Image (cartoon, rainbow, N blue to C red):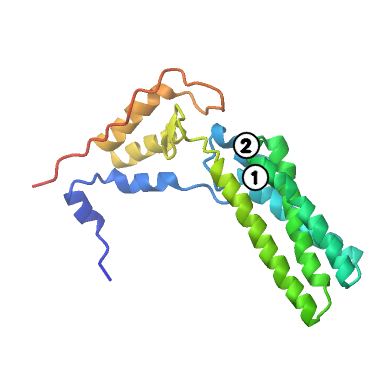
Amino acid sequence: MADRVSPRRLELAGVPPAAFALSELGRYPSFAHHPTCGRHDHHLVRPFGVPLCLGCACMYPGIAVALIALFFVSPAHDIMTAFWVAVAALGCTVPTFFQPFIQRRWYKIPARFVLGVGFGLVAGAAWILPNTLTCWAIRVALVVATLGLGTAALRLRAKRLDDPCKNCPWGAFPVCAHNLPALRRIREQQGPDPFVDSLIAELEPLAPYPPRLGEAPPVPRPGQFQFHAPPPNP
């Protein structure tokens, strides 16, 4: 196994010390799964001010609601009941296939919740099937169908991927105006550094922050970032 390159060796090779602190800029807050800037608000919910991934925060409660409801309803354990529960689960996937075309929180929140209900129902359908060889074959078919629908939904989403960072006039995460406060803290901690100073100089004219979809920064974005690393030490 190759040895890891030490920070000291990288520094001698011309990599600025602040580059190691900059590597932390790309980390998302726990359970957010997205940058927390205003342009990503349609991917987030903020209960009590805490940014959470909209999809996860809405889907997992839907799963819990479906499973709890099935537990209390206690449906009959037979193939016909399982069939209708599976049909209901299939219906819950319909909003998901429209979601890539409707990137709005008012639609995504219920769509993700209903998708979670669908996952809970398909798990419930597998649970209420009797323990026979035929029913175990049906369980396998349910798993295959669920994976197939999930793959189709992900492919559709990939074709219409919504990336708020694309062509964003405030920069592209993590090198964007959203991280200006963090960049300033790095400069305070590390001292003057041409690498960090060039980023701040490019991004500061784009403040104030945060932006929203459809808004423009106070000044045009000044071209590409120019990174200037100090020459290697002799």
Nearest the camera: 141 or 47? 141
Query: What residue sits 73% from the left and 54% below the top?
Result: 116
Q: How many numbered marks does the figure carry?
A: 2
Query: What residue sits 60% from the left and 36% below the top?
Result: 41
Q: Residues within 10 Å of mark 2 (few under 14, many from 20)?
A: some
Q: Looking at the image, is 136 positioned above or below residue 12?
A: below
On the image, the x and y values in percent for residue 189 come to 33, 41
Label 2 and label 1: CA atoms lie apart by 8 Å
Q: Residue extending furthest left? A: 234
Left/right placement of residue 143 relative to residue 77 reads left
Nearest the camera: 168 or 192? 168
Nearest the camera: 8 or 62? 62
Query: What residue sits 44% from the left and 38% below the top?
Result: 173
Labels 2 & 1 near each other (Cβ < 8 A): yes
Q: Looking at the image, is 5 positioned above or below residue 37?
A: below
**Residue 65 visible at all:** no
Amino acid type shown at disc 1: Leu
Image-quadrant location for residue 177: top left
Image-quadrant location for residue 198: top left
Amino acid type shown at disc 2: His
Left/right placement of residue 204 relative to residue 7 reads right
Q: Which mark is residue 54?
A: 1
**Circle 2 sits in a helix, a strand or a loop, which is it?**
helix
**Circle 1 sits in a helix, a strand or a loop, which is it?**
helix
Q: How crowded is mark 1: few (under 14 residues within 10 Å), some or many (20 or more)?
A: many
Q: In which quarter of the image is the N terminus?
A: bottom left
On the image, the x and y values in percent for residue 30 come to 55, 51
